[in-house]
Image (cartoon, rainbow, N blue to C red):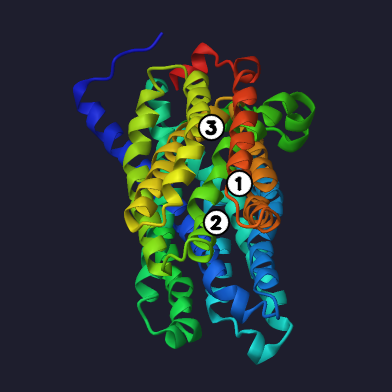
Amino acid sequence: MTTTAPPDSAQPTEKLNYRVLLGSLSGSVIEWFDFLVYGTVAALVFNKLYFPSDSEFISTMLAFVSFSLTFFFRPLGGVIFSHIGDRIGRKKTLFITLTLMGGGTVAIGLLPDYAAIGIAAPILLICFRILQGLGIGGEWGGALLLAYEYAPKHRRGLYGAVPQMGISLGMLLAAGVVALLTQLPDGQFMTWGWRIPFVASIVLVFIGLWIRNGLDETPEFRRVRETGARLKLPIKEVVTKHWGAVLVSIGAKAAETGPFYIFGTYVVAYATGILGARDNVVLLAIAAAALVATIWMPIFGSISDRVSRALLYRWSAITTIVLIVPYYLILNTGETWALFVATIIGFGFLWGSVNAILGTLIAENFAPEVRYTGASLGYQLGAAIFGGTAPLIGAWLLEISGGQWWPIAVYVGVCAGISIVASCFISRVAHTETVEAAAV
């Protein structure tokens, strides 16, 4: 049985919630800005400066390989840091992941190119990318749970959408900064202009650490700690008793991460290479779509608090399949307005809808004592399988089809189809809360 809090106690709680949401969102924005600025620059700079070759296609593929490689270290980072998160606490883990991600990003911005240090340049670049991958592998789960485990039960969809907004805000910031820098003369941009967002991100890291410093552990983790429910090896518990929830989480991730890199990253190479669009125009279109997604996600997350999240997710994935062909038909007109419209539809609304409720959907599959580990493992394995391969698959499909768009559309449809199947099993694997836990 719960009691109604007196009026004078409601205001501090509301303030605490806003502070928690800001702490969750700030780190997520920083992490994804660092991570996505690489994806943007990879298609414009790294293929020339760090992976030079006689074939533009090979150079581009190598640049995307360096981008994709980190996805396969994200699950490792998720396992390492989620163990710390489930054993020691969410807050301490978030400090480590943010520092690791920021350090790798600044190091990339200071790294000499192939012409200066030869083969050491791409090797070091890959090493720093691995650091980024490990950091973001642990960051996502902590940022999500910081919001989710503080949220009132009837507002978890809204609260869970807030850290997810960090992805589009990070991309908005990354695309906007790079778009401004591309206004520089080509020689200056290629020499030092592209380095600015990497090095300057250290300022964002310090801001994020400062915001999170004043936060306490989540109520649910405190309850787990006080009741002695912490596990010595959460990963063992997850893989032996919750493997079904992990598989469903991996499948649910497909409709988000595959389309994300097609709509939000690979579109740079497609629009500039196939449609002849200018770099800065494409980046501005992505920035506009990211802004739309940021506004739309909390709205859609709030809707999921009143409608079955699994059903809503299923229909979002179905809508992606239905609209993927119109997306390319509009995009392929080659007009500037069409580039903006298609990108806003694909990234702003289709991806934004799926992403808004994905975090809450996955978190609800796991009990608090294994939630960091289970959610991170499912999410990051899904990112590795469907996200790490997406830019490579997009480039490969375009090459073997002679520049045709329909194989990429089929790929997006397959990713959405996998999530549709996964959504049908969510009710079977979702964690059932006790009355005591729901009241915390």
Amino acid on which disc 1 is placed: Ile
Q: How far apart are labels 3 and 2 at the CA level?
A: 18 Å
Q: Residues within 10 Å of mark 2 (few under 14, many from 20)?
A: many
Q: Position of residue 304 (x, y in %)?
A: 41, 23
Count of numbered tags: 3
With 15 as the anchor, is 222 left or right in this view? Answer: right
With 243 as the anchor, is 273 left or right in this view? Answer: left
Which of the 4 quarters of the picture holds residue 296?
Answer: top left
Q: Position of residue 126 (x, y in %)?
A: 68, 69
| Mark 1 secondary-structure assignment | helix
The residue under the point 66% across, 44% down is: 386
Amino acid on which disc 3 is placed: Ile
| Mark 2 secondary-structure assignment | helix
Q: Earlier in the sequence, mark 2 or mark 1?
A: 2
Q: Mark 1 = which residue?
A: 408
Q: Mark 3 = which residue?
A: 321
Pick the front one: 99 or 171: 171
The quarter of the picture where the N terminus appears is: top left
Q: Mark 2 = which residue?
A: 266
Placement of 70 over or under 294, stated as above or below? below
Task: Spot the residue most to the bottom.
Answer: 116
The reply to whether the C-beta atoms of the residues labelled 2 and 1 are less than 8 Å apart is yes
Q: Residues within 10 Å of mark 3 (few under 14, many from 20)?
A: many
Task: Spot the residue most to the top.
Answer: 1
Amino acid on which disc 2 is placed: Tyr
The residue under the point 69% across, 68% down is: 62
The quarter of the picture where the C terminus appears is: top left
